[in-house]
Image: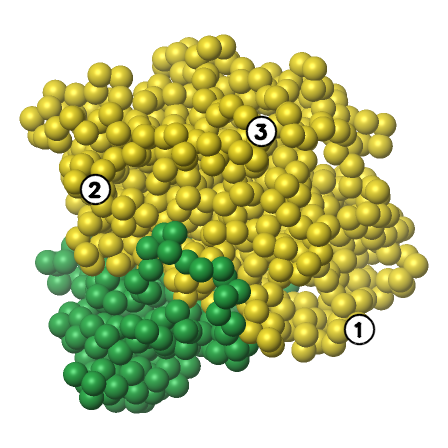
Chain colours: A yellow, B green
Amino acid sequence: MAILNSKIPEGPVHLKWSKYKETQNLVNPANKRKLDIIVVGTGLAGASAAASFAEMGFKVKAFCYQDSPRRAHSIAAQGGINAAKNYPNDGDSIYRLFYDTVKGGDYRARESNVYRLAEVSNAIIDQAVAQGVPFAREYGGYLSNRSFGGAQVSRTFYAKGQTGQQLLLGAYSSLNRQIGLGTVEMYNRTEMMDVVIVDGRARGIVTRNMLNGKIESHFGHAVVLATGGYGNVFFLSTNAMGSNGSAIWKAYKKGAMFSNPAFVQIHPTCIPVHGEFQSKLTLMSESLRNDGRIWVPKKKEDAEAIRAGKMKPTQIAEEDRDYYLERRYPAFGNLVPRDVASRAAKERCDAGYGVGSGQAVYLDFKTAIERLGQKVIEDRYGNLFQMYEKIVDENPYLTPMMIYPAIHYTMGGLWVDYELQSTVPGLFVAGEANFSDHGANRLGASALMQGLADGYFVLPYTIQNYLADQIGVARMKPQEHAAFKQAEEEVRTFINKMMSVKGNESVDSLHKRLGKIMWDYVGMARNKEGLELAIKEIQKLKKEFWEKVRIPGKADSLNTELEKANRVADFLELGELMARDALMREESCGGHFREEHQTPEGEALRHDEQFMFVGTWEYKGENQEAMLHKEGLKYEAIEVKVRNYKK
Amino acid sequence: MSDKNINIKVKVWRQVDANDKGRFETYEVNNVSTDSSFLEMMDVMNESLVQQGKEPVAFDHDCREGICGMCSLFINGRAHGPDTLITTCQLHMRKFKDSQTITVEPWRAKGFPVIKDLIVDRTAFDKILHAGGFVSVNTGNAPDANAIPISKPAADEAMDAASCIGCGACVATCKNSSAMLFVAAKVSQLALLPQGKIEAARRAKAMVAKMDDLGFGSCSNTGACEMECPKGISLSNIARLNREYLVANVTD
């Protein structure tokens, strides 16, 4: 177990971060200029880290696969960002945000990291406002707040339904300033293909230029991966089409351990699947649950009539509607956390009460419109209503929205210690790509908080502590260095191997098949038999991939099929590890629901005495089973309880 | 929902690389659900090209929910196709008729050279922002977020300007290939807020100079950009940019 040293500072939880900062090593300004940092990914975590490092004086190289850093998928986050400002004077505090986040994560997150997250949350709001992020304001000119799931206070700051966009554009503007000053070298349309390890430390990356296929490598005294989550293993998710797990997976295969891969968030309010050509799923912000009420018909015959198109939801009388979240969870009602809301929707649909195709429930604004008027609802959610109408072709002001859960976020990721350093020295991991803060379920409006906390206020400190003893290391020249040349050669071989399969099945069709296995057996409800079957099926599909994949075009030019194939090759392996992790974890917690482990009321049943640990996997080689390591979780500042949103 | 299937022809621009002259090719796509998005139709078309061993049509896309700004496309002569206030990825096939021929082209503008097929190079937008699209504040400098109250109308107006997704539809639509709406949106957002006001004049000047430098045309106020902007960015931002620019030159 000693292999996982989380390096949590001594002392009470509220003093750990201050103590760390007071005693850590620093790098003086003259030496910062001699140190290079590579940042992969330019979402909230990557852009904020790259900009902050450059402001401090480090030389930064930043990479993204999109045509501009502004397009990273953080841009799509809608609802908001949490902070413990307590501006509404409703009883919030750093402790309470910390407590809610640990409880929301079903007691599977590392306490010290979560406390630090809550502690720096307020500075994020300050920083964003200073950059010109146009948060919503009240008439007095002060910032406005709303509520999100899993909290009884209003601590969420927002910019219409485009909070992620505005926060990312804020971080991107800071990044732009540094690019303009020449302190950040930006590489767009560039995919990371591998991490380069020299004498046991991460010293750079190999990249593929997506415009001309050129394989190159880059040196850095430290490497930061901020490449987001791996939800696209499921093919259909709310992630962007290009979101992928390849950077972290390639790092995993180079020695960075992977934690809790099975912890996936399924978001309750997404637009239901329309057909077999569906390419992605669209989220409807959780903020809608502030005013929208979720229901299905109380009578099965009504649900059947609706599915057959013989009845409209507006024809169902109030007393014949089952507001099942309000019924089951009176204290939190429609604002229960996402895992709870998703499972409850599945339960109703599986029992035959679903609407639409049968895999949908209603999100209804009738009561809110009656109470507040359509104008207020329009002000609050206008852009979301418009988005819904464009996709579904129905007016949600007149008829309730239909929603169903979809894959949204991955809590699992590369293992990191308190400093956000992986098990490979010099390789740091930030944002959704790491595992650290959300346990088995992330609360709404906490992803933006974590990404920016890591990038603005955690890494700028902890990376210095690492780099302080690297000042004597001279910049390496990748063209002349054996380790870099070898890593490049391995990448070329891998690409050639994929190109030379010349089979007859498209990448997308293989990916869809993987997605179906994952959704059926490693999705919202899991069991031993299904997981064992999934592992076999995924292995079979992986074999098929390497026999059948067809990639037209050439490797040394812009080739979108090759880009996808590279990602799917990794998803096939990552999917198997997810199933293994889910199989190992013989309990239900947060988003991980094992059917064998539930209370008589159908709630998740944890087994703390056996499973209060971070399940961390070590790569053991091609076609070898990964090895499990456990980081035990200790809760000193919080009393561990059964998660209860009923009272 | 209006679920039915249609058969269409897609007349699409193919261009191997920047040096290639390029040409239209026409592909038949059958049994397209009208509930599909336009890009899902493109996926179906590409899947069939791959099955035939041909290279699929390259196009930019990512979030597929109208916010990342990566998708582009001139569809039947309009940026982001025949609907308003949406991006191409939000366009649905119910806007088209059975047996219709749909013409698909890349953005065409001097500032956005074609890379391949429907993919263009929009890094010029980033370069304009490098020149001044920011508030010069380092991480850790900020005072409490509520220290400076901002009137709700100003905050709301800044938010409207800030909702630009940088897709380039304004440039592609403009007969002069001007980037004024894009530049004006950023200049306005920051000029409206006290945090950005301090550098407003310098910012306007630097960004306009960069825009001119990169080969974008000038604005002749036709308003076409506003009509086609998927986020409805208002032309009044250009008036504000002109004011800031004037101030910058007067104070010089």
Chain under callout 3: A
Residue B171: percent from left, percent from top: 28, 74
Where residue A374 appears, as percent x and y from the top left, is: 71, 76
Q: Earlier in the sequence, mark 1 or mark 2?
A: 2
How far apart in space, not on screen, are marks 3 and 1 (Cα)? 49 Å
Q: CA distance from mark 1 to mark 2?
A: 61 Å
Instruction: Look at the image and tell me whether residue A507 can be seen.
Output: no
Which residue does the image show at 76% across and 68% down from the upper left? Answer: A368
Residue A306 makes an appearance in the image: yes
| Residue at disc 3, secondary structure | loop
* Circle 2 residues within 10 Å: few <14, some 14–19, many ≥20: few
Position of residue B195 measured from the top left corner of the image (x, y, whole percent): 39, 69
Q: Is residue A5 left or right of residue B246?
A: right
Residue A295 lies in what quarter of the image?
bottom right
Which mark is drawn over residue A12?
3
The numbered mark at residue A29 is 2
Q: Amino acid at mark 1?
A: Glu
Q: Are marks 2 and 3 on the same chain?
A: yes
Give me the residue at 39% from left, 52% from top.
B140
Q: Determine contact: label 2, label 3, CB under 8 Å.
A: no
Name the kind of residue labelled 3 in the image.
Answer: Pro
Q: Which badge, 3 or 1, is on the more N-terminal residue? A: 3
Q: How far separated are the C-alphas under marks 2 and 3?
A: 32 Å
Where is mark 1, residue-wise? A370
Total labels drawn: 3
* Residue type for callout 2: Pro
Q: Is disc 1 surrounded by few (<14), some (14 to 19) or many (20+) residues within 10 Å?
A: few
Q: Quadrant of residue A202?
A: top left
Residue A392 position within the rendered picture, expressed as x and y whole percent measured from the top left: 60, 62
